[in-house]
Amino acid sequence: MSSRANILVVDDDLGPRESMRMILKNTHNVFMADNGESALRVIEEKPIDLVTLDLKMPGMPGMDVLKEIKRINKNVEVIIVTGYGTLNTATEAMKHGVNSYITKPYNIEEITSLIDKAIEHRKFNLKLRNFFQEALFSDEDGVTEEMDNLPPLNEGSLTGTDISEELLDVTELKFKKMKERKDDFSKEIKELEERLIRSEKLSMVGQLAAGYAHELNNKLSTISGYAEFLHGKISRSHPELSDLLNNLQTISNQIDKSTKFTKNILDLSREESSESEPTDVQKMIEQVLTYVEHKAHKQEIKITRELGSHLPLISVDPGKLEQVFLNLTLNAFHAMPDGGTLSIKASRVAREMGDLLRLEFKDSGQGIAAKNIKKIFEPFFSTKGEGVGTGLGLFISRRIVESFQGSIEVVSKEKEGTTFIIEFPALMK
């Protein structure tokens, strides 16, 4: 690829098209289209590297244009540029392989930065793809077919940090050794591809998180203001309505928790130091169970505890870990709509390199299909059905656990229930 990339600007509005052309013309070759059909003709006729695509256009919808672009050439980078963005459209676009998503109006620095990163992303993919072809399949039949079937790979990470040249050097060394050994290396290749593809999803989560969390916080602030207003007015005019006042206070408390939750969403898009402190997990579990006591009774769910004596403290942010416990508990409830048992265990595990605190959340619910086990920690993946949940709960939980040097894994069989196992390094006395 030359230093001047071929960029196609797709927008039905002349103003934004011309504006984008003026921004890019000095550094790239710019093509323009005012509708989806014209854009697809350009894609078929020109070696386009990157497309900036508006979603709301007359004629062919932008999402359909995106799908057709990826069908024609799945290696073309696409940046969604729209004034009508929603969380649903952003999620749908991510599923179809967009590189970035930005809403209008945007500033020049912001859009040029996204375009530069997308171009570097494409260069990296081509370089890595060529390496796979030369280093891994040079003595195999059907090289071209094998490479064409490989999905696009992404070097990005959640914080937006580019993969350095060292990653490619390490990858090259690893695969050359695999080739020399002539072992069955297909499994390792697949795992590497899955990690790189997963990093693409994480990159998109990071790009979306800040904007949507900010929007949600604005709405929570409005709700909180009205709740405080009603609490104050009722307490002055009708202090005898204590039950209503208590309910309003509960609303305010839940708004505070939701605000903290959106802060955790924002943490996905930036690196921040966590406020760790020695934490008593037993007390935290008991606290979380008080939140769900009513729901457990209503669903006829029995909760058992096996919390070993003299459990070690662990170094975590109590608020974040409470979120993890609450998420796992509510997930278990959802898996047992007709009642069941949730067993929570905590124990010390002796290890030569240092003791661990092990936690198990085991439900007697529906279990998870084998094909979904590897997906449950991915962003936006959910087994709860359309419109139920965001698909971010387990993804965020894993991020929190791993940020405190912990690990989380799942064991499940359909119709036999699910167990989540978490381990943290124990604090020494």
Image (tube, rainbow, N blue to C red):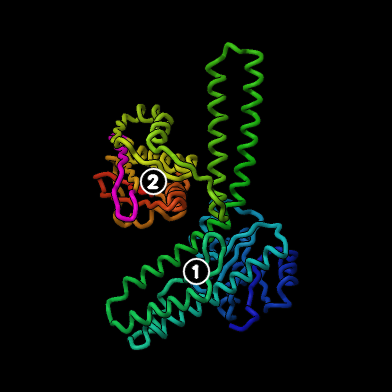
Q: Earlier in the sequence, mark 1 or mark 2?
A: 1
**Residue 345 is a magenta residue:** yes
Say which mark, if any, is on residue 337.
none
Left or right: residue 221 versus residue 341 is right
Name which residue lies at 64% across and 26% down.
228
Mark 2 Cα-neighbour bin, 10 Å: few <14, some 14–19, many ≥20: few
The amino acid marked with disc number 2 is Met
Residue 321 placement (x, y as % from top left) = 45, 42
Q: Mark 1 points at which residue?
A: 154
Extent of the magenta region: 338-355
The residue furthest front is 429
Q: In the rendered image, which quarter is residue 362 located in?
A: top left
Do the numbered discs 1 and 2 sit on residues whose CB atoms are within 8 Å? Answer: no
The residue most toward the bottom is: 139
Mark 1 element type: loop
Quadrant where the image shows the N terminus: bottom right
Is residue 142 positioned above or below 107 on the image?
Answer: below
Q: Mark 2 points at which residue?
A: 428
How far is the residue under mark 1 from the one under mark 2? 40 Å
